[in-house]
Image: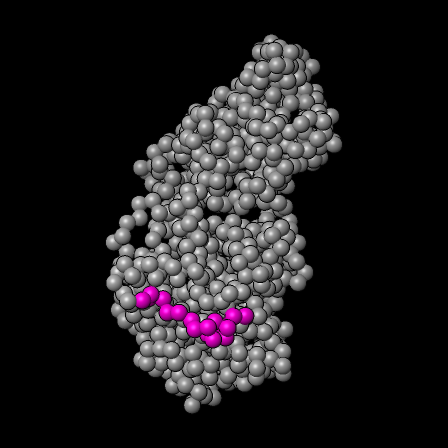
């Protein structure tokens, strides 16, 4: 989220708060009239959550050129700065890096914004400036430890630290205060990019150019004292208040500069247009502009100062490492769908009902009351889907096969000829268009016949799934080189058997999800062994499993919260990944210990979590040729305020014993796409470190909205997440093979029905032929695929393209 303050051009005295969306902004005061009219007051009244709710409703924006941007925050209590905080700066001047941060301050009267004038008083003849990363405090911070410091950061902006060096030195006895605190000596803006939207603040690049000539360029990884350490030191001696800003002083003179920066005196003398700008990320900090001299300097001004107009539509932006990043040559890019969500034709030919067919026919189960009976009608219009794939230029298409469409009875005694024919045509059409098919065997649509026998809580299902997989290998394995056995075991077991949110809606909380977890893992292992022993040598493909790997961490740096985060990720991810990918196998020790402890406290004679036998542990270990990685967001866990009885007992949440939230990060149309891009890098690194750096296929990543063709928010999400993925590849050396955008088109989004839109293509459900229309994100992804380059500044031109 990119927060701004602005005034309307016809009423320049009234300040309003808004947030940027591309070249537009949304006024939050109009969307919620209870909100204060300055950002500082919004922070002081703890009202930022109301702004985040407005973001989720997608109100109508107004053009950015219809308003005047002002400083994104003003009237703050403190403007604090860190001196000599850049490693290369110290080396160039042969100075010893300071052991502790050197702190000085400016007064809030130094703060100005876009369009304001920097006033140069005639009492100073030596003025220069540096472009810096500024940290904005979001909530009251006192005695904060470094490892929890980011919890107190609202976000980041760009600042110019202007200095009257003569007043800093000879005219004031070497004291900083007067030389740093002349009025207007701290231009900031144009916006504040919130903590969850900036990527890694310790891996940013900030640049400054004058008339196209680069004057400064530095990275925050060169900071001697990192942001958390600075906040810890400051908050140990003073209380940081909402709205306080901290200039981190990371910039250093470039070789083009004679001093720390070109003297403003020199710019005044030239009397020419001077541009201060940065190669930028448009969705991080805002818009570009210039510095201009208001009058030539031939006549000494009679007033006490000269005005230099800073039109801070700045083009000063933070760069998350780089604006343009080349993707690895061997990184494959694709899109994904699932059979139940797009095919429709729920009862066509000899297909039998799945658990989801029956579930969505029960009134009240689906939030918008819709069904997937017809969905996108891809069963009939699959060739149009392939035309869309060709338009995008994807390397591969991940889709799933419907178990009840292939085996109407659920068992291998009856194989549907029409089902085999449909998938043969789909696969052959993909291959004829040079698109690799990546097949998921099971994406949640279990034959109802098998659920009537207990479904995933019946141990025999591992054998039933083994036979189903054998049918698929025999029928399609000559052309399919990448198999995914099961998609997201957690969602199957927890939501369908532990809860009643998903089909089949058993609601045996604290028991059903654990029984299902063991059976799902064994079923996967059996399918993998069948491929390995009977088909791999001839078909020469790979087989793996996809696990939902949203990241989990402590809400604060307290030991209890850190421990809660570690527990949560083992319940959410390790429960399914650890038996397959770890060296020791079996369920994670943390999960076994916690479930066993709570089971005994609740009077159960043994743990509700079934154990694997030694033979089963060995049978399961290593049964995946890659780690299928689905990721959407990150949750934060705290034990503060948690009490027994808050959740059903027994239950999965009670076993974890903590409260989960998305904190105040930017939410999408549904919570599980809350925008926390750094989480995907953390999750990839966690998989690498936990499971010996396996090959990773990112099999789903995407953003849900309520609709609309010009889906800038989805593009922004993709940019931020792909940027962090590249960091995971280049910096953390994670072994990422492929990236899959979810989804090719809008589809039936499970318990949300048709109302939530994940598609690069919009589907018109009112049209009998289900017309598909390319969104802006489709054009953006097409550019990514054609250039194999992540251009964080690229904004596609929307065209009218339909299929």
In this rendering, position of residue 32 left or right of residue 391: left
Q: Which sits in the foreground, 623 or 234?
A: 623
Residue at x 33% of width, y 65% of height: 607
Q: Position of residue 749 (x, y in %)?
A: 40, 65
Q: Which sits in the foreground, 88 or 16?
A: 88
Q: Which sits in the foreground, 759 or 660?
A: 660
Q: Which sits in the foreground, 459 or 41?
A: 459
Total label count? 0
Location of residue 219 (image quadrant): top right
Residue 198 appearing in the image: yes
In this rendering, position of residue 705 left or right of residue 333: left
Q: Position of residue 351 (x, y in %)?
A: 40, 83
Residue at x 57% of width, y 25% of height: 102
Residue 348 appearing in the image: no
Residue at x 52% of width, y 44% of height: 198
Q: Position of residue 274 (x, y in %)?
A: 66, 29
Here the colouring is one colour
Residue 758 higher or lower than 425, as above or below: above
Q: Is residue 407 magenta?
A: no
Residue 279 higher or lower than 256, as above or below: below
* Residue span colored magenta: 606-622
Residue at x 49% of width, y 20% of height: 107
Q: Position of residue 761 (x, y in %)?
A: 49, 63
């Amino acid at each position: 989220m990119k927060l701004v303050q602005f005034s309307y051009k016809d009423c320049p005295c009234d300040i309003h708060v808004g947030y940027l969306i591309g070249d537009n902004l949304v006024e939050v005061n109009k969307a919620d009239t209870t909100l204060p009219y300055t950002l500082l007051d919004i922070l002081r009244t703890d009202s930022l959550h109301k702004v985040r709710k407005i973001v989720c409703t997608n109100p109508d924006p107004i053009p950015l050129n219809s308003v005047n941007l002002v400083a994104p925050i003003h009237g703050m209590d403190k403007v604090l700065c860190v001196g000599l905080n850049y490693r290369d700066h110290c080396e160039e001047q042969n100075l010893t890096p300071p052991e502790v941060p050197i702190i000085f301050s400016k007064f809030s009267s130094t703060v100005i914004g876009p369009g304001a004038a920097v006033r140069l008083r005639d009492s100073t003849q030596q003025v220069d400036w540096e472009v810096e990363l500024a940290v904005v405090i979001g909530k009251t911070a006192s005695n904060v430890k470094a490892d929890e410091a980011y919890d107190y950061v609202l976000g980041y902006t760009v600042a110019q630290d202007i200095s009257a060096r003569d007043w800093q030195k000879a005219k004031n006895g070497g004291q900083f205060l007067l030389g740093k605190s002349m009025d207007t000596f701290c231009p900031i803006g144009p916006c504040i990019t919130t903590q969850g939207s900036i990527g890694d603040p310790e891996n940013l690049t900030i640049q400054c150019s004058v008339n196209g000539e680069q004057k400064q360029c530095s990275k925050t990884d060169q900071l001697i004292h990192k942001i958390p350490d600075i906040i810890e030191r400051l908050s140990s001696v003073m209380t940081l208040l909402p709205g306080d800003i901290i200039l981190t002083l990371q910039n250093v003179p470039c070789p083009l500069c004679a001093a720390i920066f070109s003297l403003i005196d020199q710019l005044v003398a030239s009397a020419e247009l001077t541009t201060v700008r940065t190669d930028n990320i448009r969705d991080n900090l805002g818009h570009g502009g210039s510095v201009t001299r208001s009058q030539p300097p031939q006549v000494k001004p009679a007033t006490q100062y000269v005005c230099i107009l800073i039109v801070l539509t700045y083009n000063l932006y933070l760069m998350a490492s780089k604006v343009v990043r080349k993707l690895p040559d061997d990184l494959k890019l694709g899109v994904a769908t699932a059979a139940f969500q797009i095919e429709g034709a729920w009862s066509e030919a000899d297909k039998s009902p799945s658990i989801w067919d029956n579930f969505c026919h029960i009134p009240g189960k689906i939030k918008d009351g819709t069904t997937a009976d017809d969905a996108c009608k891809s069963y009939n219009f699959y060739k149009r889907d392939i035309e869309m794939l060709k338009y995008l230029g994807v390397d591969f298409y991940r889709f799933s096969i419907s178990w009840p469409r292939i085996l109407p009875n659920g068992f291998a005694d009856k194989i549907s000829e029409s089902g085999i024919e449909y998938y043969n045509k789909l696969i052959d059409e993909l291959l004829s268009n040079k698109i690799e098919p990546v097949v998921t065997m099971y994406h949640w649509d279990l034959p109802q016949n098998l659920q009537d026998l207990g479904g995933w809580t019946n141990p025999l299902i591992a054998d039933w799934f083994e036979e189903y997989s054998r049918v698929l290998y025999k029928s399609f394995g000559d052309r399919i080189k990448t198999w995914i056995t099961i998609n997201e075991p957690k969602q199957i077991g927890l939501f369908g058997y532990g809860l009643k949110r998903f089909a089949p809606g058993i609601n045996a909380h604290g028991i059903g999800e654990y029984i299902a977890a063991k059976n799902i893992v064994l079923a996967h292992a059996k399918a993998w062994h069948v491929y390995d022993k009977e088909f791999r040598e001839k078909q020469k493909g790979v087989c793996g499993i996809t696990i939902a790997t949203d990241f989990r961490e402590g809400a604060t740096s307290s030991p209890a919260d850190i421990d809660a985060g570690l527990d949560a990720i083992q319940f959410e991810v390790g429960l399914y990944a650890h038996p397959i990918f770890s060296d020791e196998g079996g369920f994670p020790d943390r999960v076994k210990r916690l479930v066993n402890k709570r089971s005994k406290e609740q009077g159960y004679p043994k743990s509700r979590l079934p154990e694997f036998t030694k033979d089963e542990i060995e049978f399961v270990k290593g049964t995946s040729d890659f780690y299928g990685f689905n990721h959407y967001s990150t949750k934060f866990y705290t034990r503060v305020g948690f009490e027994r009885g808050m959740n059903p007992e027994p239950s999965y949440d009670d076993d974890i014993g903590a409260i989960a939230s998305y904190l105040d990060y930017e939410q999408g149309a549904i919570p599980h796409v809350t925008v926390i891009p750094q989480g995907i890098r953390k999750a990839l690194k966690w998989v690498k470190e936990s499971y010996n750096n396996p090959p990773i296929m990112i099999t789903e990543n995407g953003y849900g909205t309520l609709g609309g063709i010009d889906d800038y928010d989805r593009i922004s999400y993709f940019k931020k997440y792909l940027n962090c993925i590249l960091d995971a590849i280049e910096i953390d050396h994670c072994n990422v093979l492929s990236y899959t955008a979810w989804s090719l088109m809008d589809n039936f989004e499970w318990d949300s029905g048709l109302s939530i839109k994940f598609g690069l293509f919009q589907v018109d459900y009112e049209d009998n032929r289900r017309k598909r229309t390319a969104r802006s994100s489709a054009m953006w992804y097409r550019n990514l695929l054609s250039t194999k380059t992540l251009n964080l500044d690229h904004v596609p031109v929307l065209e009218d393209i339909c299929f």
